[in-house]
Amino acid sequence: MDVPAELVADKPTVSRPTNPADWAALRANVELDCLLLALAKVAWLIAQGSDGLRFESAAIGLISGFVRRRPDHALVPILAEYAQALESRLAELFHLAASRAQAGRAYLQRCVLLRP
């Protein structure tokens, strides 16, 4: 999953809220927990063999939704970097698939041309 360590680094330090700022911090922490749990669930479903799931595209969608709802969250810059890294990885996978498909077409064309 390659989740950045900064997203989970402060998880054990949540304290009991006593004022509105503490409640806002707790809310932000719980919302991030929900995002991380959703990412873990997608990864688990893929590991269990669920068809049609790709972690990168699912994670990009989940992160985008989170950032739309909480653009002021303190970890948005880290989430944006993570989403960008996932987009780059997805682009590499598409490029690899396209080059393999092109090589496969070229091979088939050679086979057809070499047939007596």
Image: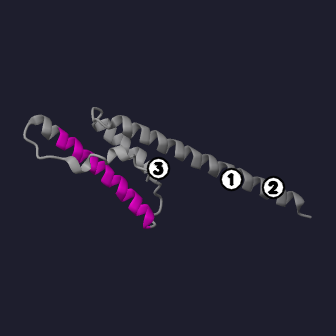
Furthest toward the right, the residue is 116
Residue at (23, 45) in percent of width and height: 29
Crowdedness of circle 2 by 10 Å Cα count: few (<14), some, many (20+)? Answer: few
Residue under label 1, please give it.
101
Give the foreground label among 3 and 2. Answer: 3
Left or right side of 51 for 94: right
Number of callouts: 3
Spatial CA distance of label 2 from label 1 is 12 Å
The spot of residue 64 in percent (x, y) is 37, 40
Give the foreground label among 3 and 1. Answer: 3
Residue at (58, 46) in percent of width and height: 92
Residue under label 2, please give it.
109
Q: Quadrant of the C terminus?
A: bottom right
Q: Quadrant of residue 114?
A: bottom right
Q: Main secondary structure of the magenta part?
A: helix
Tag 3 near tag 1, CB within 8 Å: no
Spatial CA distance of label 3 from label 2 is 33 Å
Amino acid type, mark 1: Ala
Q: Earlier in the sequence, mark 3 or mark 2?
A: 3
Q: Is residue 110 above or below residue 79?
A: below
The spot of residue 28 in percent (x, y) is 22, 41
Q: Start and end of the magenta stretch?
A: 25-48
